[in-house]
Image: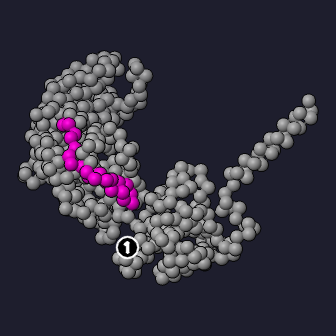
Amino acid sequence: MISLKINYKRLFVGLLTIALVSCSNPWEDRENNGDANLSVTLSEAITNTTEVSQFGQLLVQTGYDKVLAASKTYTVFVPTNEAMDQVDDAILNDPEALKKFVANHIALTAYSSIRTKAQEKIKMLGDKYLLFKGATMIDDATIVTADHYAANGVFHIINKALTPKLNIWQYINSNSGSAMSQYLLSLKNINIYTSDAEAKANAVPGALADSLTNSYLKNVYNLNNEKNSYTLFLMQDAGYSTEVDKMKPYLTVATPEGTAALASYFTVRDMAFPNAYELNQLPATLTSRFGVEFPVDKTQIVGNPIHLSNGVIYIMKKVDVSLTKRLLTTKIEGEKNYGYVGTRTPILYRDRIDPFGVLFNDIMVQTPARAKFTLTYYAKDIMYSTKYKVYWRAINDQSGTFQQQLAIGGNYDVTTNNIVNMTTTFPLITVPFKNYDEILLGEFTKTNANNTDLISLIGGTSSTSALTLDYLKFVPVLK
């Protein structure tokens, strides 16, 4: 029995040794393996390798030979001479483009082909990120031979040059012929929200200025960001015009130009998504960051996907997002009030749990010591020009009943210390005891699409009348 235990221990040690060897990193095990390149720098090793000599010459021509002779550790993806023969002469003859081209093949840090990650985005010495897939692919190039080690890094020989691609925003700038592209670019000068105007006023000129000032990049997704990946559906003119026209009745403002700009924004904001979806990965439905369900009709895709440095674009004949999906409910949480008319003392912000075990937050005003104590709210997003059904959920867990009402619009009167001139005022409603249902308050209509800056929850006429609110809902009604 004792000898059996010893044999198990020996077997375990043997298996552990095999596991450690098989999982070791070749970069860490490179010393003393007989490779002559280990005594030279990456620049020298690449230059001395015949099948990649053309790229080696470019390293010298652009000065990157000196970079790869430094003491830092690098990875270089080196195109074969055959791959270099396919590179556009316009790049090779333009010193600035050539430096960007060479930089797009070099990464700081050693990346071996022995990898634990299925794929990884790695930062190149230019401003691009490339996807290292498994042990055999970098972007859309195949690694022919991997793990050529030198004193300060590793190089892999690839079958295709890694010419820097445009990112999605650069592509839109260089292909601005479509109406949707032109509108996206125009948002550099159009403000959708007040904060957009502030961003434009404080902008510093430069390559990233659009990322900070364009209302689409600022409010939807920054399609100029190289680090993240996106999918954008870019509509052809006829389909784009149809979708925008569907939205115009719900985004009416003072001028036709303003209505068109707003309808366009509420159309295109639901056309971009995080992650780069390949054609075979596209689901039947995607949900935009604003909660709109976007049906992906692959039969409307024109041509091949356009692969870019930070994602993919699909050109669409048309999309058809139903208005029931486009027109989102505005929900305002009770505990998210931005002000009050009264004093802060009686206001309680509460963590609650309903009878079904669901956690929620609400607000309660107890014994406010003034009649018509008021909590004020605003809608963060632009509300549509249409009729709304208005609901609240307000849970009364006090010992007695009380009344409260909702008002929309108006202004604060310093003389009476009240909200006055409301455009819509709903009747006082008695808040029933421990009722967790939504209550329909009634309807109101917005004739112009805009931010709703003043929504008031007003207490009863007694100085001891409480207020409470879990949330408000404004549900748009189709015309």
Viewer-proximal residue, 335 or 386? Answer: 386
Q: Secondary structure at mark 1?
A: loop
Q: How many marks?
A: 1
Mark 1 = which residue?
Answer: 88
Disc 1 residue type (three-letter): Asp
User: Residue 35, image x and y in percent?
Assistant: 70, 70
Residue for point 22% across, 40% down: 321
Q: Is residue 207 visible?
A: yes
User: Residue 327, image x and y in percent?
Assistant: 20, 37
Left or right: where 268 falls relative to 307: left
User: Residue 133, image x and y in percent?
Assistant: 51, 54
Viewer-proximal residue, 119 or 203? Answer: 119
Residue 46, picture quadrant: bottom right
Residue for point 35% across, 61% down: 167
Residue for point 40% across, 19% down: 355
Residue 248: in magenta span: no
Q: Residues within 10 Å of mark 1 (few under 14, many from 20)?
A: few
Residue 136, picture quadrant: bottom right
Residue furthest to the left in view is 255
Viewer-proximal residue, 51 or 229? Answer: 51
Residue furthest to the front in view is 82
- Which range of residues does the magenta coloring cover? 302-323
Viewer-proximal residue, 342 or 214? Answer: 214
Q: Quadrant of the C terminus?
A: top left
User: Residue 108, image x and y in percent?
Assistant: 54, 67
Residue for point 22% across, 27% down: 391
Residue furthest to the right in view is 2
Figure check: 329 above or below 102: above
Residue 317: in magenta span: yes
